[in-house]
Amino acid sequence: MLIGQSIRKYRVGKKVTQSELAKWLGVSRQAVSMWESEKRELKVNTLRKIAKVFGVGVDDILKSSHNAEENKEDKMPRLAKKKSAKNKVQFQLNAPEAKRVALTGDFKKWAAKGVPMRKSKDGTWKANVELQPGRYEYKFIIDNEWRHDPNNGNTIQNAVGSLNSIIEV
């Protein structure tokens, strides 16, 4: 299930029409239709408004779309893979004013809890993660706000129109 399908699921579950949702968001019904059919990308602020309308968190909408993809992948036959040695990778972020920082990404199935990071005296947050060789997308969650790594120019646009940082191990 993609994000648009997840939004449709919440909309139908709450017995809300596309027109009603459009009116609450201040957009056209066609815009809602385009989002639900994945023909137009959502901006993060719009996704936040949709989540608020349905009384859920943005994470709930994203989890619904990720969980369906994971379930689909689980049903596919898998080839036996040779296990690769894991590498310890250190992630760092300078955010001295932050109260809480966590790291999440496709290697953590985008869990909102993520990997807690530790703050050093100089305001730098650090976390070590063991990863197998490969390409990974990730973000920092700084006081509940998801942000890409400002020190990593290797990024990719995600399904909600923001950027994910990329690391190759």
Image (spheres, rainbow, N blue to C red):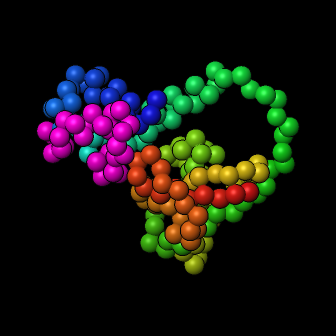
Confirm whether residue 117 shows in the render. yes
**Relative to residue 159, is residue 147 depicted above or below?**
below
Please tell me which residue lies in front, 31 or 85.
31
Is residue 89 shown left or right of residue 115?
right
Which quadrant would residue 24 be assigned to in this image?
top left
**Relative to residue 146, is residue 9 depicted above or below?**
above
x 69%, y 63%: residue? 90
Q: x, y (%) of residue 143?
A: 43, 59
**Residue closest to the far front:** 39
Please tell me which residue lies in front, 98 or 25.
25
Residue 43 highlighted magenta (yes or no): yes
Which quadrant would residue 97 be assigned to in this image?
bottom left
x 19%, y 35%: residue? 29
Is residue 56 shown left or right of residue 137?
left
Q: x, y (%) of residue 138?
A: 57, 54
Confirm whether residue 60 shows in the render. no
Please tell me which residue lies in front, 67 or 33.
33
x 65%, y 59%: residue? 167
The magenta stretch spans which residues? 23-48
Is residue 88 shown left or right of residue 150?
right
Q: Main secondary structure of the magenta part?
A: helix
Q: x, y (%) of residue 46?
A: 28, 48
Residue 28 highlighted magenta (yes or no): yes
Q: Quadrant location of the C terminus?
A: bottom right
Is residue 39 shown left or right of residue 141?
left
